[in-house]
Amino acid sequence: MPAGRQIVQSYGDGRFRIAGEVYAGSVLIFPEKTQPWPVAAIADMTTASLQPITALADTPDILVVGCGERFVPPPADLRQGLRAHGIVMEWMDTGAACRTFNVLLGEARHVAAALLAVE
């Protein structure tokens, strides 16, 4: 895998270790960078909260969303809002999302992730 790729190394205790860096709270991950995401609950997940992804000139094909410790259904309008930007949303619990993002990144897929921190 190319240097600088944002591999999720661990998660839990309200933080993530990604490519050797520790991030407290939820994050948005792109292949080359990770940034804090000020979303702490599913109710706060909106198309607007994902603007750092949807505003990209070259939006990812797939957005892997980690919804927390357990799978719960996504907000109804979120999938449609992302689809309007040409992005397919893959919704799963945060642990599965971390693993899925790493696999897709390893396959050189055009992917990003939005991960809720878990305790």
Image (cartoon, rainbow, N blue to C red):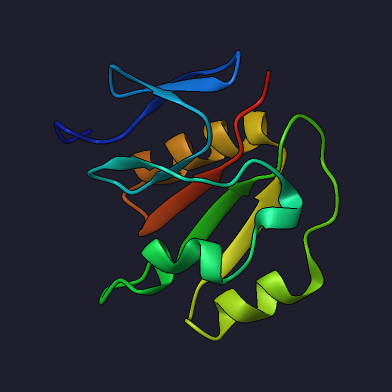
Residue at the extreme right of the image, as rendered: 72
Examine the rendered structure and indicate whether residue 64 appears above or below residue 106. Answer: below
Which of the 4 image quarters holds residue 70? top right
**Residue 49 relative to residue 56: left or right:** right
Q: Residue 114 appears at what percent x and percent y? A: 52, 48
Q: In this view of the protein, which residue sits in the foreground, 5 or 16?
A: 16
Q: Position of residue 72 (x, y in %)?
A: 85, 47
**Up-down relation of residue 45 to residue 12 (above or below):** below
Q: Give x and y (percent) for residue 28.
A: 43, 46
Report the residue that reaches farthest toward the top: 13
**Residue beneath the point at 68% across and 70% down:** 78
Tell me the quarter of the image containing the C terminus.
Answer: top right
**Considering the image in quadrants, where does the N terminus appear?**
top left
**As drawn, is 29 to the left or to the right of 12?**
left
* Residue 94 placement: quadrant: top right
Q: How many labels does the image show?
A: 0
* Residue at the image point whose x is 31% and y is 50% from the top: 108
Residue beneath the point at 65% across and 58% down: 45
Which of the two residues, 37 or 82, is positioned nearer the viewer here?
37
Q: In this view, does 76 lie to the left or right of 28?
A: right
Quarter holding residue 35:
top left
Find residue 107 and report its horizontal and vertical position in percent: 37, 45
Which residue appears at 75% of the width and 55% of the height? 43
- On the picture, is 112 further left or further right than 75? left
- Image vertical order of residue 107 relative to residue 20, above or below: below
Q: In the displayed orientation, state which residue is furthest to the bottom.
A: 84
